[in-house]
Amino acid sequence: MTEENDPDLLETGDIFFLYRPVVNEHDPKSVEEVQRFYFVLRPEGDAFVRLCVAGRKRLPDVTRHERVWGFVDMVEKDPAVLEKVLREETYETGTRGAQRLPAARPAGEGVYAINLKDGQMHLSYALELPEDPDEVQRSFNIAPEASFALSVKNPEKGQPKGAGLRPEQKADYPERLQKAFRGRRFSREDLRLLDYEGAEFILVGARTDPEAAYEVDLETDDEDYDSAEIVKRLRMVKSRHPVKPLFEGKWD
């Protein structure tokens, strides 16, 4: 992992990628059959985990410096709470009867670092699983390693009609943190703004070589089912969450 005395280092930890199929689709074969694509940031120290939703149901294309909007869906101290939300769910509707929302599937695991360079935060990661990324990872633009410029949106600033979260869904920052925006539409330096549910952010594809570009040491380990952090820490056991995409890179 990155050297702890690096003055530009803001955070390191484990990163997990997951997706959830659309209602009643238990054998998805493409992104079109996916309801949501997530990534989870678990900072070192196990203090909490952030469940983030990536718009467009994929990561930005780094080679094209693509922009993807997203938001923090949950911030939890207990990963078990998050895992329960991502389990299969059955609910009743008045017209269609019982509907089944499939469980989320893990699609990748690795390590990440968030650093600050020239007044801009960058989220960099390197995959540990799957060992050989395949069709699932290509579908979500989960490269073996990548880096994205990370900016947090000011909830008090407007946005295009029909875009982003509704006002009541946006992060409600305490005054001391709201001041971090200094009246701007985005904050590019203060990672604390990402610790609130409803925090909206923009990821911009930046580099395919984060270790060389930002002098971060993304030290990965060989993992299997028994050692995978997504199983141990997030409790995404195969009895509740199909794990084939995580280990084989294939759709279920």
Image (spheres, rainbow, N blue to C red):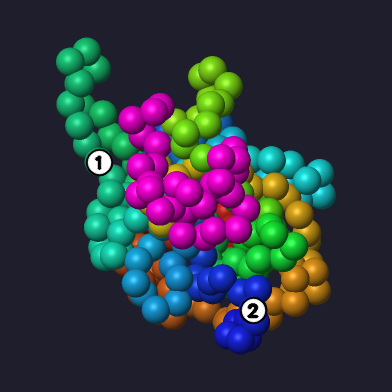
Q: Dot 2 corresponds to which residue?
A: 7
Identify the residue at horizontal 44%, vertical 67% (top origin). Answer: 42
**Residue 252 can be seen in this image:** no
Q: Quadrant of the N terminus?
A: bottom right
Q: Picture coordinates of residue 244 (x, y %)?
A: 49, 59
Asked if residue 193 is positioned above or below residue 90 in the image, the reply reads below
Inter-mark Cα distance, 2 to 1:
44 Å
* Mark 1: amino acid: Glu
Query: Relative to residue 32, is residue 145 depicted above or below?
Result: below
Question: Mark 2 belongs to which amino acid?
Answer: Pro
Label 2–label 1 contact, CB within 8 A: no
**Residue 117 sits in which quadrant?**
bottom right
| Disc 2 secondary structure class | loop
Q: Quadrant of residue 5?
A: bottom right
Give the class, few, some or many, for how many residues have Cα within 10 Å of label 1's Cα (few <14, many ≥20). Answer: few
The residue identified by callout 1 is 89
What x and y, as percent, mark residue 72?
A: 43, 47
| Residue drawn at point x = 22 percent, y = 13 percent | 95
Front one among 135 and 178: 178
Residue 149 in view in this figure: yes
Front residue of 7/82: it is 7
Residue farthest to the top, as pictured: 95
Question: Could you tell which of marks 2 and 1 lies nearer the N-terminus?
Answer: 2
User: Who's the residue at 69% across and 40% down the image?
Assistant: 67
Q: Answer with left or right where residue 207 lies relative to residue 3.
A: right
Q: Residue at x 54, y 17 (%)?
A: 161
Residue 208: where, in percent of width, then height? Answer: 78, 61
**Considering the numbered disc 1 on the image, is that residue within a helix, a strand or a loop?**
strand
Magenta residue span: 166-194
Q: Classify residue 123 as left or right of residue 210.
A: left
